[in-house]
Image (cartoon, rainbow, N blue to C red):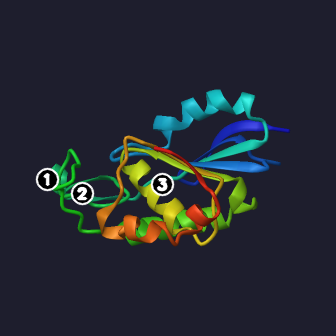
């Protein structure tokens, strides 16, 4: 068993990169990178020798709420902070959802051994990933995130594999 922290391209892999039987996909927030969470995952890794942590890097793109400045972002945000009246254009959400779903599909472990989670914008994306996944995941952790209005998660939740398959949620 080898536990390590290394960059695989632009994304970050932490923990058991050789024989993991479970994976945590952790999604960073607006303007952050996998490095922002890598040290925390590295501290958890020794206590979880069967787990690999995958931390994808968001693309760099313009963000409306920051005057159009380009930064790492999973989706465009019209305004911050987010509240019930904040517009949700859905820009870049489909691409980000597809990217995380593809990451999960390629992990080499069954979806029921995968937890997806994130912070802020990453938490919002993690919730959408869990509720739109074709198969139930083991869990979803949302730290300071929100449901993406454009994805109509409330209407989709009852029919989702996550609800039918008893995905555990920490929100």
| Mark 2 residue crowding within 10 angstroms, few (<14) / some (14–19) / many (20+) | many
Determine which residue is flagged by label 2: 77
Q: Give the SS element for disc 2.
A: loop
The residue shown at (55%, 36%) is 38
Dot 2 and dot 1 residues touching (CB under 8 Å): no
Where residue 155 appears, as percent x and y from the top left, is 39, 70
| Mark toward the start of the polypeptide (3 vs 2) | 2
Residues packed near mark 3 inside 10 Å, few (<14), some (14 to 19) or many (20 plus): many
- Split into 4 quadrants, where in the image is the N terminus? top right
Q: Name the residue under label 3.
A: 126
Nearer the observer: mark 3 or 2; the answer is 3
Which comes sooner in the sequence, label 1 or label 3?
1
Compared with 47, 116 (above or below) is: below
Residue that appears at 73% across and 28% down: 47
Residue ID at (68%, 65%): 106
In this figure, which residue is indicated by the disc labeled 1?
67
Is 133 left or right of 153, judged from the image as shown?
Answer: right
């Amino acid at each position: 068993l080898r536990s390590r922290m290394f960059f695989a391209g632009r994304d970050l892999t932490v923990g058991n990169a050789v024989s993991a039987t479970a994976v945590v996909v952790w999604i960073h927030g607006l303007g952050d990178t996998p490095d922002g969470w890598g040290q925390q995952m590295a501290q958890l890794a020794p206590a979880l020798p069967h787990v690999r942590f995958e931390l994808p890097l968001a693309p760099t793109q313009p963000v409306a709420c920051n005057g159009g400045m380009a930064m790492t972002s999973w989706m465009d945000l019209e305004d911050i902070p987010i509240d019930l009246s904040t517009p949700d254009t859905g820009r870049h959400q489909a691409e980000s959802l597809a990217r995380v779903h593809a990451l999960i599909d390629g992990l080499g472990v069954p979806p029921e051994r995968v937890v997806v989670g994130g912070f802020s914008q990453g938490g919002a994306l993690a919730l959408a990933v869990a509720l739109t996944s074709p198969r139930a995941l083991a869990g979803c952790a949302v730290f300071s995130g929100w449901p993406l209005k454009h994805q109509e998660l409330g209407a989709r939740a009852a029919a989702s594999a996550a609800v039918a398959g008893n995905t555990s949620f920490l929100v």
